[in-house]
Amino acid sequence: MAGTAVTRPTTWARRTLPISGFTFLAYAFSLLGFLVLMLPSTRPPDRLSPYVRRLGVVYGPALAALVMASSLRGRRGVHQLLRSMLPNRRWVVAPAIIAAGLIATAAAARICGASPGQILGTIHAWPLFFAHVALQFFFVGCGEEMGWRGWLLPRLRERHTAGAAATIVGAIWGVWHLPILLTGIRTAAVFLFGVFGLSYLFTALWEYSGGSVFLIAVAHAAVNAPLSWFNEPGVLASLPSEALFETAMGIYGVLGLGFVIARCRWFFSVEQAQA
């Protein structure tokens, strides 16, 4: 009995402390980056500067993942984490992922009042769209996803179903966006709905790709880039950006909810967690 009493807390700590430690580090590193972001900038504004200034924030999860991988598994853990960022044979679906993100955002723009002609007329600015995709991939997708789906999700999948792991990641990921959550109850509710939906969709994509974080970073860019692009002067900047953002997140929330309903065994089956 004494041995069992000692073993249970030890097992709990071994399972829980790495997750808690990662979460604390991700929030702490990003908070430091946010404080730096708040410092006044002397650089003239351009399209690149917002990405560069947010680098310390969005790479907080990546830094936390590297620290945890190194502390728990040494160089092997770091190498494994970095390898997950490389494209594998599933990379060929990347264009389809980008197209899906563009279609979802175009649907949100249509709901917000943009005419089909206005949406189709944005084709003249497509080089700018792909520039945003590249910037979102390198500056945002890789930074966040090395942490969320590169380190955190695999650790949770060791003892949780895919659906449960996706829910936990979604909660941690959502709270990490605290500045958005503080903008208002409606925005926070719609945003969290979208975050959980995306967490389920990204987890499904992660499993389909065999753990490729590269594809998840592409998907992250595909969600963010069209929103940035449509708000560019001369594209669809006449649309209210807050309404476009909330509508797009609502669409992703509905898609994620539909996926969970269609794949309820994926969410509840214990066997999935042991695969």
Image (cartoon, rainbow, N blue to C red):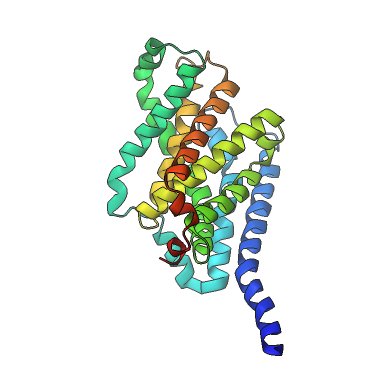
Q: Position of residue 106 (x, y in %)?
A: 43, 23
Residue 223 sits above or below residue 33 on the image: above
**Quarter in which the C terminus is drawn:** bottom left
Which residue appears at 44% of the width and 32% of the height? 132
Q: Position of residue 121 (x, y in %)?
A: 37, 13
- In front: 143, or 174? 174
Residue 74 sits above or below residue 263 on the image: below
**Quarter in which the N terminus is drawn:** bottom right
Q: Quadrant of residue 36?
A: top right
- In front: 63, or 180? 180
Residue 135 in view, yes or no: no
Which residue appears at 48% of the width and 46% of the height? 200
Residue 239 in view, yes or no: yes
- In front: 193, or 142? 193
Please state if 89 lies on the left or on the right of 46 as rendered: left
Judged from this view, the residue extending furthest toward the bottom is: 2
Q: Position of residue 147 (x, y in %)?
A: 53, 55
State how many labels appear: 0
Please state if 252 lies on the left or on the right of 45 as rendered: left
- In front: 170, or 137? 170
Q: Quadrant of residue 45?
A: top right
Which residue appears at 50% of the width and 13% of the height? 113
Please state if 80 lies on the left or on the right of 155 as rendered: left
